[in-house]
Image (spheres, grey):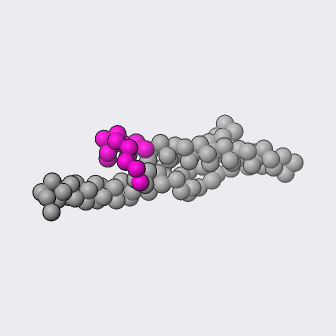
Amino acid sequence: MPKGFGDMMKQIQKMQAKMEEVQKELENKRVEGTSGGGMVKVIANGKQEILEIKIDPEVVNKEDVEMLEDLVLAAVNQAREKSVEIQNDEMAKLTGGLKIPGMPF
C-alpha cells in the first residue's frame, strides 16, 4: 500500500471520529420555531428531531382548527429549517466548506 494512501486513510478515520462528535453535539443543540406571534413554539435539536411543541391556549379554537394546524406546521417548518442550518454550519466547520457527496449532512 502506498504511503500516501495510508495517510489518506488516517485522515478519513480522523474525520469520521470528528463527525461522530459533531453528531453528539447536534443532538444537544436546540432551535426554536415560532408562529402566530409566539403562540405556537416548536423546539427541535440539531438532528431535526422535534422535542417539544407548546401551544398557547388562546390560539385553540374548535371553530378554526385549520388556523391552528397552519400555525403548528409553520412553527415545525421553521424549527426544521433552523436545525438544517446548524447542521450545515457544523459540517462546513468539519470539511472547511468542502461539500463531500454521501456525507450525512
Q: Residue at x 13, y 58 (%)?
A: 2
Q: Is residue 33 visible?
A: no
Q: Residue at x 25, y 59 (%)?
A: 13
Q: Count the marks.
A: 0
Q: Residue at x 81, y 49 (%)?
A: 65
* Of the pair 4 and 52, the residue shown nearer to us: 4
* Of the pair 53 and 12, the residue shown nearer to us: 12
The spot of residue 99 in percent (x, y) is: 38, 44
* Of the pair 58 and 104, the residue shown nearer to us: 104
The spot of residue 23 in percent (x, y) is: 39, 56
Q: Which residues are magenta?
A: 88-102
Q: Is residue 39 above or below residue 19?
A: above
Q: Is residue 18 above or below residue 88?
A: below
Q: Residue at x 80, y 47 (%)?
A: 66
The spot of residue 8 in percent (x, y) is: 21, 54
Q: Residue furthest front?
A: 1
The spot of residue 60 in percent (x, y) is: 78, 49
* Of the pair 72 and 47, the residue shown nearer to us: 47
User: Is residue 76 magenta-colored?
Assistant: no
